[in-house]
Image (tube, rainbow, N blue to C red):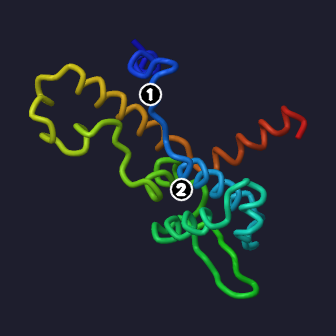
């Protein structure tokens, strides 16, 4: 059974849903915004906040975390702003999300081997482990550059 179907059965419509936080969404969108700025230019956080509809105070915290993790570089002063800490082709969605959320774990029993005394005999643990591995592979396979390119395609298709 494809992993999407497995997750659909585990998280049916109308029930509890597994989801990343708004912080993850805002972080990816902010990074896409910075990546779309012409080379050599600095992105201004108040402009990112406006374009991406992210509360300024929230964006300030996000930029701080992304900077600590080396995904952004900040410059202060009248001519200050932010730029990518490394090329967009070298930044993955997983790196962005984990910079602001910490390690991605679908279930508590996946945090460390042996965390749950049932993990070696539990068939559900195997499903969680496979689902997490597939999710992490997918997030690792999508770069910031991929997202920026895809956004341009979607905007062109939408006539935006």
Image position, residue 113 (x, y; %)? 16, 41
Q: Residue furthest bottom?
A: 77
The residue under label 2 is 90
Q: Examine the image and state in which quarter residue 74 appears.
A: bottom right
| Closer to viewer: mark 2 or mark 1 | 1
Q: Is residue 19 above or below residue 39?
A: above
Task: Give the quarter of the figure containing the C terminus.
Answer: top right
Q: Which of the marked residues, 2 or 1, is nearer the chain's N terminus? A: 1
Depth check: give the residue in front, 58 or 25: 58
Q: Are marks 2 and 1 in contact (CB under 8 Å)?
A: no
Image position, residue 58 (x, y; %)? 60, 62
Depth check: give the residue in front, 75 or 55: 55
Depth check: give the residue in front, 116 or 36: 116
The residue under label 1 is 16
Q: Examine the image and state in which quarter residue 36 appears.
A: bottom right
The numbered dot on residue 70 is none
Q: Residue at x 66, y 72 (%)?
A: 82
Q: Residue at x 78, y 43 (%)?
A: 152
Image position, residue 9 (x, y; %)? 41, 15
Task: Give the quarter of the figure containing the N terminus.
Answer: top left
3D distance between C-alphas at marks 2 and 1: 34 Å
């Amino acid at each position: 059974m494809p992993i999407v179907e497995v997750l659909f059965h585990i998280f049916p419509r109308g029930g509890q849903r597994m989801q990343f936080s708004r912080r993850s969404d805002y972080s990816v969108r902010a990074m896409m915004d910075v990546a779309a700025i012409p080379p050599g230019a600095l992105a201004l956080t108040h402009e990112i906040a406006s374009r991406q509809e992210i509360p300024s105070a929230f964006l300030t915290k996000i930029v701080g975390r992304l900077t600590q993790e080396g995904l952004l570089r900040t410059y202060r002063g009248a001519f200050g702003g932010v730029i990518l800490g490394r090329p967009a082709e070298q930044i993955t969605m997983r790196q962005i999300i984990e910079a602001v959320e910490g390690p991605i774990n679908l279930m508590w029993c996946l945090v460390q081997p042996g965390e749950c005394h049932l993990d070696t005999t539990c068939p559900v643990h195997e499903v969680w482990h496979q689902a997490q591995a597939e999710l992490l592979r997918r997030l690792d396979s999508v770069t910031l550059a991929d997202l920026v390119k895809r956004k341009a395609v979607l905007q062109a298709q939408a006539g935006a």
